[in-house]
Structures are given as structure tokens and as C-alpha cells.
Image (cartoon, grey):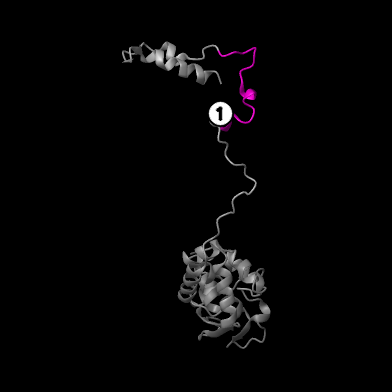
């Protein structure tokens, strides 16, 4: 489910850490994430790791209902989500209902047990980077942070997409001309003369098949089959 750094880059840019110097990644524990909350332990200069928390607002049930309707109406977006991937276009779908999947800096409520006064401190910044990397590994964690588990999201999308009526077939062209009753006109058009051989290039051999085949030993009513077919070939090649 990796996204080659797309989601981590988007998240770090929105929280203003895209250009910051990263804290050593191996000092951050795995980030625990639940609806609206992320936490981790970061080893600093003290023997005891610091406790770090990052919280964001979750979407309300009404917002999630609108989001799920928008995702279900997104066609390929819903198909990707049901298939276990989160496409970049999911952000466009959420924008149609006035919400953003990834929080910006103003939505973050951050706290660290270290003695530093700055927010974010380097331990918080390291936790945000670790959280960003986890979004690349599993983008559905972004949904969970906003309050919707992957299982419930897929269940809702499955129900909504199944309930949607199939796409209507395109209306027939009302200006289409009816088929002609004349086979000759149908194949040659209203002006068969336009397909006639030019005078300077007359057909050299109008009935090659009937004249070049060996005379068949089939007799019908005392007449050879070739003699019976020749008038038909003459009519066909006269077009």
C-alpha cells in the first residue's frame, strides 16, 4: 500500500515541516494512532523517553456521511478504496464537501513531556515525521485519524456503490437516417455512379471467377452450372 512518499510529503508540507532538519528516526517508537489522536515515545537526552501526543479534530458523523457519498460517486476513487489503495484524487472528492483529509498546522494540538517550551519541539517534529512515513506505508491511517476505520469505510462504500443506479445508456441519435429499403442504394449510396469505374480505367476482367474456374461437372435441367451462374456474375459486375 506504499505511496512512494506522496502522502508523507503532502502531510509535512501542510504542517510546515517539509524543510526542517529531521530528528534521528531511530529515536521514535512506533506511532500509536486512533481517531483524533497519535502518540509516541521519543528518546532524548534523558534516560527516560519523552511522551508525545498529537491530536486533530475528527469529522462528525454528518461529515462522514457526506464524504462517503462523495467517494461512492467518484467511480474509480471508490474502486481504488475498495481494492485497498488510497489514490491522490481522494483529496479532490473530499474537497467537494468542504473538508480536507490531511490537517494543517492550525488543526494540530501538540504536547510533549520534555522541558522545552517551543511547539513543536524536536521530539514532536520527529513524531510528526514518523507519522508521515506511516501514511506512506498505510494511507488508510489518515482516514482512521479523522475518525473512520478502514473496515467501516469499505463497508459503507460497498453499500453505497451497490445502491447506485447503473449509468444510463446514451440516447440514440434522433437525427440518424432510416435504413433504405434498396440493397443497391444501401451498399452504393444515393449516387451509385460515383463508384463507377472511370472511363479511362475500365475493369479488365469483370467475371474472373466464373471464367477461370474449370467447368464443373454439375448439370441442372440439362444446363451446366457455369452457364446458369454466368448471368448472375454479369449482373453483379455491372455495378
Residue 213 horizontal/vertical position (percent)? 39, 13
91 drawn magenta: no
Residue 214 horizontal/vertical position (percent)? 37, 11
Q: Residue 180 occupies which quadrant of the picture?
A: top right
Residue at (54% x, 72% y) in the render: 25
Residue at (55% x, 56% y) in the render: 169
Taking depth in this image into account, of 52 and 169 the one nearest to the observer is 169
Q: Is residue 87 left or right of residue 213?
A: right
Asked whether residue 169 appears in the rendered view, the answer is yes
Residue at (35% x, 12% y) in the render: 223
Q: Split into 4 quadrants, where in the image is the C terminus?
A: top right
Q: Which residue is farthest front? A: 221
- Count of all numbered marks drawn on residues in the image: 1
Taking depth in this image into account, of 50 and 81 the one nearest to the observer is 81
Mark 1 sits on what residue?
A: 184
Residue 61 horizontal/vertical position (percent)? 56, 82
- The residue stretch that appears in magenta: 184-203
Asked whether residue 21 appears in the rendered view, the answer is no
Residue 39 horizontal/vertical position (percent)? 53, 82
Q: Residue 238 occupies which quadrant of the picture?
A: top right
**Mark 1 Cα within 10 Å, few/some/many (few <14, many 20+)?**
few
60 vs 222: above or below: below
Q: Residue 9 occupies which quadrant of the picture?
A: bottom right
Q: Secondary structure at mark 1?
A: helix
Taking depth in this image into account, of 58 and 33 the one nearest to the observer is 58
214 vs 55: above or below: above
Amino acid at each position: 500500500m506504499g505511496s512512494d512518499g506522496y502522502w508523507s510529503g503532502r502531510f509535512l508540507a501542510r504542517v510546515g515541516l517539509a524543510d526542517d532538519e529531521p530528528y534521528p528516526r531511530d529515536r521514535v517508537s512506533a506511532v500509536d494512532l486512533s481517531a483524533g489522536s497519535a502518540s509516541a515515545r521519543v528518546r532524548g537526552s534523558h534516560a527516560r523517553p519523552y511522551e508525545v501526543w498529537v491530536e486533530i479534530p475528527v469529522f462528525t458523523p454528518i461529515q462522514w456521511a457526506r464524504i462517503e457519498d462523495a467517494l461512492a460517486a467518484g467511480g474509480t476513487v471508490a474502486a481504488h478504496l475498495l481494492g485497498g489503495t488510497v489514490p491522490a484524487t481522494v483529496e479532490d472528492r473530499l474537497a467537494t464537501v468542504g473538508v480536507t483529509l490531511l490537517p494543517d498546522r492550525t488543526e494540530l494540538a501538540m504536547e510533549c513531556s520534555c522541558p522545552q517550551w517551543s511547539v513543536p519541539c524536536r521530539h514532536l517534529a520527529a513524531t510528526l515525521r514518523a507519522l508521515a512515513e506511516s501514511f506512506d506505508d498505510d494511507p488508510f491511517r489518515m482516514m482512521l485519524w479523522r475518525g473512520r476505520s478502514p473496515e467501516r469505510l469499505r463497508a459503507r462504500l460497498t453499500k453505497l456503490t451497490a445502491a447506485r443506479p447503473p449509468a444510463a445508456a446514451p440516447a440514440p441519435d434522433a437525427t440518424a437516417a432510416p435504413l433504405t429499403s434498396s440493397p443497391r442504394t444501401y451498399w452504393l449510396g444515393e449516387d451509385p455512379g460515383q463508384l463507377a469505374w472511370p472511363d479511362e480505367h475500365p475493369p479488365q476482367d469483370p467475371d474472373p471467377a466464373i471464367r477461370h474456374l474449370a467447368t464443373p461437372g454439375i448439370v441442372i435441367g440439362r444446363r451446366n452450372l457455369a452457364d446458369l451462374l454466368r448471368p448472375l456474375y454479369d449482373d453483379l459486375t455491372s455495378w
